[in-house]
Amino acid sequence: MRESKSVFMTQSFDAIVIGTGQAGPPLVRRLVAAGMKVAVIERAKFGGTCVNTGCIPTKTMVASAYAAHMARSAGQFGINISGNITVDMKQVKARKDHISGQSRDGLEKSLKGLKDCTVFQGHARFEAPHEISVGDVRLEADKIFINVGGRAFVPPVAGLDGIEYLTNSGMMNVDFLPRHLAIAGGSYIGLEFGQMFRRFGSQVTILERGARLIAQEDEDVSDTVREILENEGIEILLNAECKRVAKSGGGVLIRAEVAGKAREIEASHILFAVGRQPNTDDLGLDKAGIKKDARGYIGVDDQLRTNVEGVWAMGDCNGKGAFTHTSYNDFEIVAANLLDNDPRRVSDRILTYGLFIDPPLGRAGMTNAQVLKSGRKAMVGQRPMTKIARAVEKGESQGFMRVVVDADTKEILGATVLGPGGDEVVHSVLDMMYAKKPYTVIQRAMHIHPTVSELIPTILGELKPLEAAPSVNAKGVA
């Protein structure tokens, strides 16, 4: 008998985009508009992390948790609500699924209906630098864009294979109220889920390996966020590491080391939120000669080109950012260089992000610690939310705002807004940073009263040397 061999059909395109996360679809549209024939490959749900397990569904759940919190707090505003406030988790999940599903389905429909765009559903693997296999189909193109995103990293905790555990993806299937949710990880994902489920009614314990929450922030930010969460009844354990987990009744027994001492925690569920890893381990990058670092991130230059000519990497898989907005900006950089003769670079962008607890944190540029470490002469202005009328009127006076500027150039170096609307307020400062204008421009602006933003010009008129500036806590006390 003759040995049977698989026969691959090879289809040629001008460009191939692997993955439909935030950078992929807008690039596809730009490439098609430029007259290219484009193939798009998606192995799972359209839209990537943001649409399915990240921004859209989690912020929808945050909104439900905020509604429950405000209902319980109604008496403070003179509003009487009779009876106990209860949360229907099945309805919370249904609302989340509907909103997330609309985005996902709309994206899928638009790509499949786009002229000169062919969608392939399946797992993509490199067979050569410019050849991709998807099942029994082979695709080739001179230009290939990798946009495969990332997933939750699960640490190698003893006993993990004997229990059921949750990650940010698994949390999307929760349609019940966990009795006691233990969260390993005290950064953005862990804190958002922690406050969310505490407001839904769960007992919540957060275990953070480090000496403080969100260690990349200034210490007073970490301390204030901790106060905010503890004031809502969340137990926070610092210098805490999960050593072993095991089934215990209908839940999980966590054996941890907390500040050097052994401790056992009985929880109904455990969520691991200790970091992310790129989806690059099964792409066949070695066959294409595409380099990646020890953590699996694809190496790229300042314009997101890999070491292989004609291949780019965008989004979470390139290690240049872990947010939807950095992924979308990756698309803008690639499109500008490739299609617009506009030499944009990754190094031109200013780091900015939000922590979507309540009140939210908006961050841009350098922290105080980073500025001090740089050795430059700087000035800082800050004010607690207890001294901002709009925050007090809304009953949301936890947190503070701060702006740090270069004493010589007068340019803004960084901003922190932890308080109501902080995720929006910070953009006015961010825009000034991109404009590279002196802080006096925004200081002299007339802002609307009563708002949180109106205090930015005020604090810029009260600058002090950075090293002399006091920190503030959640109660606004210096």
Image (tube, rainbow, N blue to C red):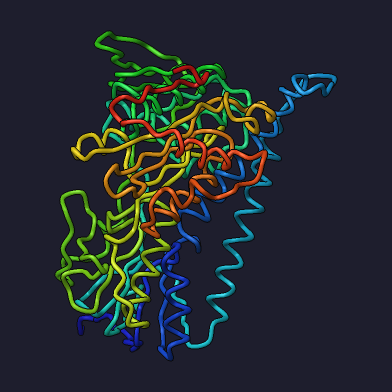
Q: Residue at x 30, y 84 (%)?
A: 141
Q: Specify whether residue 433 is in view.
A: yes
Viewer-proximal residue among 108 and 474: 474
**How many numbered circles does the render carry?**
0
Residue pushed farthest bottom? Answer: 35
Instruction: Report x, y in % for residue 436.
Output: 36, 57
Q: Quadrant of residue 179?
A: top right
Above or below 455: residue 45: below
Q: Residue at x 18, y 59 (%)?
A: 292
Instruction: Report x, y in % for residue 70.
Output: 70, 29
Q: Quadrant of residue 336?
A: bottom left
Q: Residue at x 33, y 64 (%)?
A: 314
Instruction: Report x, y in % for residue 131.
Output: 25, 79
Q: Residue at x 64, y 60 (%)?
A: 102
Above or below 12: residue 381: above
Q: Specify whether residue 250 is in view.
A: no
Viewer-proximal residue among 72 and 151: 72
Instruction: Report x, y in % for residue 194.
Output: 50, 29
Q: Give the quarter of the figure containing the N terminus.
A: bottom left
